Image (spheres, rainbow, N blue to C red):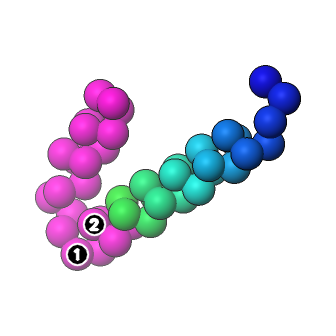
Amino acid sequence: MSGSKPQYSVLERNRGVLAAVAGTAITRPGEITKRFVAAMKQ
């Protein structure tokens, strides 16, 4: 595990997920549970 690139991509992906969740929470609070469960199942 000697590579900063994989970790960086993981951070970027997590940030994207957080942004999507935040946007969903603002627009449609009901969808957040579904998206959270789907993300956990991956």
**Chain part drawn in magenta:** 22-42
User: Residue pushed farthest right?
Assistant: 2
Look at 36% across and 60% down and name the residue there.
Answer: 21
Look at 25% across and 54% down and name the residue there.
Answer: 32
Foreground residue among 21 and 16: 16
Residue denoted by label 2: 24
Does dot 2 land on a helix, a strand or a loop?
helix
Residue 39: x %, y % from top left: 33, 39
Quarter of the figure with the C terminus: top left
Look at 52% across and 52% down and name the residue there.
Answer: 13
Does dot 1 land on a helix, a strand or a loop?
helix
Look at 26% across and 37% down and name the residue there.
Answer: 37
Q: Amino acid at mark 2?
A: Thr
Residue denoted by label 1: 27
Is residue 4 shown above or below 25? above
User: Residue pushed farthest top?
Assistant: 1
Residue 9: x %, y % from top left: 62, 49
